[in-house]
């Protein structure tokens, strides 16, 4: 088996998208898809995470299904609303060689996505690749 990759996803991604970020390594990799329960500022402040958790579950399930269909060995999990905490938790049990952070382009970003790529590079000491998805 090849590399162990954590793919942090806010939206479902395809195997082709993951391959564009990590190249040929994706086909032989083990991938843990982590979908943080991203929430709006209002729902975060009012402690209403239910919709965000349900959405994160759907995102990771759809991503795992897409990756499996393209022959990429994938499993999934949902994570904390803070993407960095979601990564930190995943790294406790999954010794990833590399992290791929998938975010929305520009104005489509959730407020929790801001700066997550740079902070992940600083905090985790692993290669972090960034993939913007529509």
Image (tube, rainbow, N blue to C red):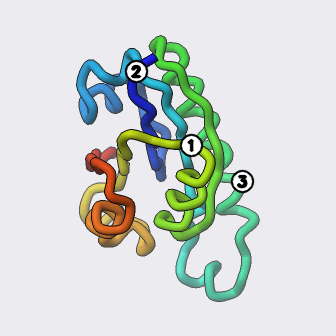
First of labels 2, 1 by sequence position: 2
Q: Look at 29% across and 61% down and name the residue there.
A: 121
Determine the residue positioned at 27% across, 32% down: 22
Q: How busy is the neighbourhood of tag 2: few (under 14 within 10 Å), some, or many (20 plus)?
A: few
Mark 2–mark 1 distance (CA, rounded to whole Å): 14 Å
Q: Residues within 10 Å of mark 3 (few under 14, many from 20)?
A: few
| Towards the viewer: 71 or 103 | 71
In percent of width and height, residue 26 lies at 36, 23
Q: Are marks 2 and 3 in contact (CB under 8 Å)?
A: no
Query: Mark 2 or mark 3, which is nearer to you?
Result: 2
Classify mark 1: helix, strand or loop: loop
Task: Reply above or below: 78 against 58.
Answer: below
Which of the labelled discs sits on residue 94, or is there none? Answer: 1
Q: Is residue 22 above or below residue 60?
A: above
Q: Which residue is mark 3?
A: 54
Q: Secondary structure at mark 2?
A: loop
Which structural element holds mark 3? helix
As measured in the structure, the alpha-carbon distance from the residue carrying label 2 to the one carrying label 3 is 31 Å
**Residue 40, above or below 14:** below
Distance from Cα at disc 3 to Cα at disc 1: 23 Å
User: Looking at the rendered structure, which numbered label has been put on residue 2?
Assistant: 2
Q: In this rendering, would 83 be left or right of 116?
A: right
Query: With 47 as the anchor, is 87 left or right in this view?
Result: left
């Amino acid at each position: 088996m090849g590399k162990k990759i954590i793919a942090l996803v806010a939206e479902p991604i395809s195997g082709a998208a993951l391959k564009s970020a990590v190249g040929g390594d994706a086909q032989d990799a083990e991938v843990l898809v982590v979908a943080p329960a991203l929430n709006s500022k209002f729902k975060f402040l009012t402690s209403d995470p239910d919709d965000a958790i349900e959405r994160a579950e759907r995102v990771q399930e759809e991503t795992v299904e897409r990756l499996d269909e393209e022959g990429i060995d994938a499993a999934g999990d949902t994570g904390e609303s803070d993407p960095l905490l979601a990564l930190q938790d995943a790294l406790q049990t999954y010794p990833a060689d590399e992290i791929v952070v998938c975010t929305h382009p520009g104005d489509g970003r959730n407020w929790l996505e801001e700066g997550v790529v740079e902070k992940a590079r600083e905090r985790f000491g692993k290669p972090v690749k960034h993939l913007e998805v529509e």
